[in-house]
């Protein structure tokens, strides 16, 4: 799955809340759904979309499904976003060097 698909999945506020909850580690659906303003079936649907996009992985333990973040997929998004930062730093460096050079002539 591409970083674009991952960004699209992460654009939803409920899915963002799920990512925040999963930062601490794997959780079952019931704990993920607790306190969210959507139903548990809706949370399951969000988790299914996140799983299909590679944002989370699911493991079964008895009758419970545990979800955890898939850091490999999120790392792809991080690298994509860092490319903007790299370009910005390069431009800043060029502007600073041009300013410094102009002031010393």
Image (cartoon, rainbow, N blue to C red):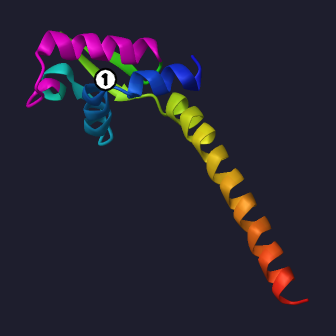
Q: Is residue 94 visible?
A: yes
Q: Residue at x 71, y 51 (%)?
A: 87
User: The N terminus is located in which quarter?
Assistant: top right
Q: Answer left or right for 55 relative to 95.
A: left
**Magenta stretch: dominant SS?**
helix
User: The C terminus is located in which quarter?
Assistant: bottom right
Dot 1 lies on which element?
strand
Q: Answer left or right for 40 relative to 92.
A: left
Could you say where residue 70 lies in the image, as x and y percent from the top left?
45, 28
Task: Using the image as rendered, state which of residue 31 and residue 101 is in the foreground.
Answer: 101
Q: Residue at x 48, y 34 (%)?
A: 71
Task: Using the image as rendered, state which of residue 50 and residue 92 is in the foreground.
Answer: 92
Could you say where residue 14 lies in the image, as x and y percent from the top left?
25, 27
Task: Using the image as rendered, state which of residue 84 and residue 46 is in the foreground.
Answer: 84
Residue 54 shown in magenta: no
- Residue 91, located in which quarter of the rendered image? bottom right
- Residue 2, located in which quarter of the rendered image? top right
Q: Residue beneath label 1, please?
A: 67
Q: Which residues are magenta?
A: 33-53
Q: Answer left or right for 33 relative to 59.
A: left
Q: Is residue 64 visible?
A: no
Q: Residue at x 38, y 18 (%)?
A: 50
Relative height, residue 104 to residue 65 (above, below): below
């Amino acid at each position: 799955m591409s970083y674009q698909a991952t960004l699209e999945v992460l654009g939803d506020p409920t899915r963002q809340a799920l990512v925040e909850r999963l930062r601490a580690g794997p959780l079952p659906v019931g704990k993920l759904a607790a306190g969210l303003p959507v139903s548990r079936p809706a949370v399951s649907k969000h988790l299914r979309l996140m799983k299909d996009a590679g944002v989370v992985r699911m493991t079964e333990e008895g009758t419970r499904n545990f979800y955890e973040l898939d850091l490999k997929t999120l790392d792809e998004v991080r690298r994509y976003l860092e490319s903007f930062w790299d370009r910005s730093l390069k431009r800043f460096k060029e502007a600073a060097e041009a300013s410094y050079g102009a002031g010393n002539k």
